[in-house]
Every structure is written in C-alpha cells, then in structure tokens.
Amino acid sequence: MMGPDSAAGLRYPSLAMALGLVALLALPLADAAAQGKRVRPAEEQPEHYPDGPNRETTFYFCTACHSFRIVAAQGMSRERWDESLTWMVDRHKMPDVQGEDRGKILDYLAAAFPERKEPGGWKNPFTGK
Amino acid sequence: MGRPERSIDELYADDPARADAVVFRRRTDVSRRGFLGGAGLAAMSAAVGGPIVFAPSVPAGLIPAAFAQEAKKEAPAAAPGPQKLSFPGKDGGLVVLGDKPLVAETPEQLLDDETTPTAKFFIRNNGQPPEPTGDPDAWKLTIDGEVNKPVEIALGELKKRVQPKTLRMVLECGGNGRSFFAPQARGNQWTNGGAGCAEWTGVPLGDVLRSAGVKASAVYTANYGSDTHLSGDPKLVPLSRGVPIRKAMEQHSLLVWAMNGKPLESIHGAPLRLVIPGWPGSASHKWLTKITLRDKVHDGPGMTGTSYRVAIKPMLPGGKADDANFKILESMPVRSIITSPANGTRLGAGTKELKLRGGAWAGDLDVQRVDVSIDFGATWQRAYLSPTRNRYDWRRWSMAVALPSDGYYEIWARATDMANKAQPHIAGNWNPQGYGANPMHRVAVLVG
C-alpha cells in the first residue's frame, strides 16, 4: 500500500505507525476538512518547556499575565531579558520584581531561551535549516 | 539511523507542505490548493478508510481529524511546536503565536484569496477581549476632549444617520515581519502573516468627529476600547493608541461595523471598531467605546518608549535603545508575499513552468511594481499587477516563470512603492521591539 512512501516510513517510524492505526478508522475526510478540526493542545505546563533551575518560579510568574508560549518564542541575552522585565513594568504595569526573585527568573530565561545563533523567520523547508 | 522519532503532529507543525510530501507524496502544485495524486491519494484514502471524494479541495497541510487524534496519543509530553488555531469560525491553518492574549497569523499561502475571508484573517489582541455584546445597536461611542460639544452616539443611531461605505483595505499588525530581525526582536514572532485585506463597511471617522466640532487645538486622537488588562486589574488599560487628526480625518479612516459583508465578529472588534488603513493595526482599535481628541500627541499605553516606534538614527542590532532616538511608526513599509505556491512545494520532474500568485501593499502608498527572481536576485522579472478597487486595497500580482531545469529554486518577491522604496534582502533598521521588518518573501520549491 505504501509504495514509494515506505522509505518515509522508515525515517519516521511513528508516522508509519500512525498510518497503520488510522487505517482502522473510517472518518470521512470531507467532514474533517469542512469543520477544520485540529488537535487542541493541552493546557500549558512548566514541563512543556526546557528543564532547568527556577523553571516553575518563572513559569508561574510569567503566566500570571500571559501565555508562556510567547516567552518561549523569544531568544535574548540575559541583559535583554532584564530590559524586557523593566519594559513590562513600564509598559504593561507588571508588578515589579527585584532582588533574588528577579535573579532567579533571569537565570532561567537566559539559560532556557538564549539569543539564537540562527534567527527565526525563514528556514529551508527541505533541509529544515 | 539515530534520527529522533517524530510524531506526525510535529512533522506537520514544522512544515505542512513538506509533511504532505513525506506522508502522502501529496503536492501543493500550481493549482490554487494542494491536491492529491497517485500513490499519495491512495495512501490517504486507505488511511481514512474510503475514497477521498473532494481530494482536490483539501488544502495543503490539513491533517485528517482521525489522523490527528492518533497522532496526539503518540506525541510525547514535550515542548509544543507551532500550534494551529482552534477557534470558532476561524480557519484551522492559522498559526497561534500566543494564547493569552490570543494572537494568530495567517501563513502566506492562506492569503491567496482576492479578498481575505474573515475565517482566514489574522488575530491580534493586546488584552482580554470583552464578552460579545447582546445588543450591538445599543453600543455607545463617546467623542470628547478637544471638541465643541462632546457626543455620545449609539451604534444603531449612527447606522440610521449615515450612508455607509464599503472599502477593501489592508489591515496589518505593526509587528508584521518581526521574526526576520537578527538578533531576534522582542514580541510576537510574526512572519508575513499579520496582514489581510478585507471589505470594511462603516462611516468615515472624520464625519463623526466633525459632528462634535473639532477644535483647532486638537492634534491627536486617543482611542479606547472595552477589552481588559491581562492582569485582570480593571483600573489598567491594555492599549490606547491614536493617530494625528489629519490621519483621522482621511476619508478612508472608518468607524466599522461590518467585515466582508457581515456584522463584525467579536474577535475582530464587534460591534464597532476603527480601521485606520496603512498604519499599524493597533491604531484600528477594536470594541471601540471612546475617542478623546487631545491637544498633544497621545501618550497612552502603546504610544511611548519603543512601542510601535522605530529608531530615528539607525541603531546597532541588539544594542540598548535610547527612547529619545525613537519616533512613532506611521505608514507601514512596502511588502509583497507569494501566496502560491506554498513554501516547500515539490513539483514533478520535467516541470517547465511555474505559475506564481501573490499580494503586495505599501502602507499609505500604492505599489508601483512587483519583481520576482528565481535565481537569488541575479535577474528579475516584472509581475502583472491587478487594479485596485480603492486606495489602501492591496495589489494582487501574478506571473509565470520558466524553469530551466529540474532542481532546487527559491522564488523571491520584491515590491516597490510609489516613493521608489523597495523591499530589502534582510530586515534592516533593527529596533528592540521589532517594527518595520519587510525583507523579500522567499519560497523554496523542489522540482523532480
């Protein structure tokens, strides 16, 4: 059945398994297309993000106002993370955080989401680079 | 060997077109939508347990629901990849940039319609949207500040009093293109999908301001809506931006209650919003309740510091910003996108011609030309531009390019505005919050 796709199956074993599993189901595709159904991701949890000291502290501090997805989408030096906290206090009236707590949060952010060597934006879709 | 196992979810999240190619040998070709052919169609049909009657109309990258559910069971509890939007009335192909506040962009290949359907229109919120109103006509708008007689008017009354006009105009987030900055700029990482071109129905804002009697002292608007601050603190305003009186008085700056011929949807600002075309979308306040005319440049949340501002004297990328070196971003820069084919499209061996389609717009200006290169900018070919319906409409562009051989190509699109400004190769004029990035759009295709 797979024909030329078998090579892809080898490279992506879970994919081949998924294909096998869904072959047992009989859901009309047209319905799925019409309703635009999607996997709804689970609620955010600290465990979804890079492990490291102060992850939970940082997660719950940030998510008091906004989703952590937007945090994880950033990549900045510790200095720019520090500026960002200040900016959130100024612009978004975030409760100020100073001293030891600020240090812990910055430690995690700078370690988990450092400035990226490769910027975002465009990636070659065939090589992923 | 040693390659990490990937769930179908991740594969699709990374790049739907490529995933299609891998999973089903499905190609998003020069036709308007992706289609299935040969072994791919057979494989997908087998997977869903029956023939796929409407295969040609299944958009590229769409995961059959049955498939997706299984994929979820397989997915490890790892960091979530790019997340597709699940929201009533919205296309599932939109990509979520943030859940709270809800922000979602439209991948370029979904901007392939002449008029962007509401379902595909991007979402940007700064605060928590209000509960949908039960009685739109009772919605009140206040005009006060530097006016002779402050006005409070119900939307129902406004609709009765004026002859509405409908204009097709681009609305674009001020941060569109931000992800192309290096080093990374702070904020939602938009590619080119924080834009759309819809038909907006309403009344010129200037007509309503005039009815209140604009004083000579008025220089700027201060716009307020009923969305609430993310912290939940009712005393805080999430966003309040404005525009100079001259921009507010333009005939195309509208108070809007309908989008694409239907009443505004709540997520797009129902029952009443502003559309200030050509300028950052944040000036087009949703759930509009009040416009205060001020005798100085507005200084509400989103007006000051480096927010919706760009550097006057170009700064070192990644450097520390001096607020005094920043000016308000007014007109958005020129931009073009390739809406077909999608990035990552595979074409059959021997394909000699590729039909291209796209859109282009330029803030306050019209687009003078769109040029396309398939050889990394060594040579350029001029695209055909469709006429515009009205000012601030986008240009749809199209052309066919000859492919000299099989192989790897990148299509680059470059628009030039009426002031002879063209899109640069990379995002320039770096600023910490990442405004004004408009590098050429690139789409990679593999032939054979």
Image: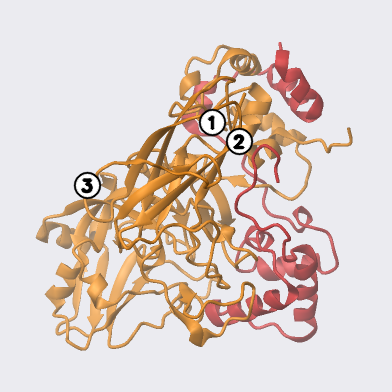
Q: Label for residue B124?
A: none
Image quarter where the N terminus of chain A lies is: top right
What number of labels is visible?
3
Instruction: Specify which label sits upstream in the sequence, 1 or 3.
Output: 1
Tell me the SS state at disc 2.
helix
Q: Residue at x 50, y 19 (%)?
A: B55
Q: Do the residues under discs 1 and 3 have CB atoms within 8 angstroms?
A: no
Mark 3 sits on what residue?
Answer: B389
Q: Colour of chain A?
A: red
Q: Position of residue B224 (x, y in %)?
A: 36, 72
Instruction: Specify which label sits upstream in the sequence, 1 or 2.
Output: 2
Mark 1 → mark 2, Cα distance in angstroms: 7 Å
Which chain did the image draw in orange?
B
Q: Residues within 10 Å of mark 2 (few under 14, many from 20)?
A: many
Relative placement, left or right, of A110 versus B390 is: right
Q: Label for residue B16?
A: 2
Q: Residues within 10 Å of mark 3 (few under 14, many from 20)?
A: few
Frontmost residue, B248 versus B430:
B430
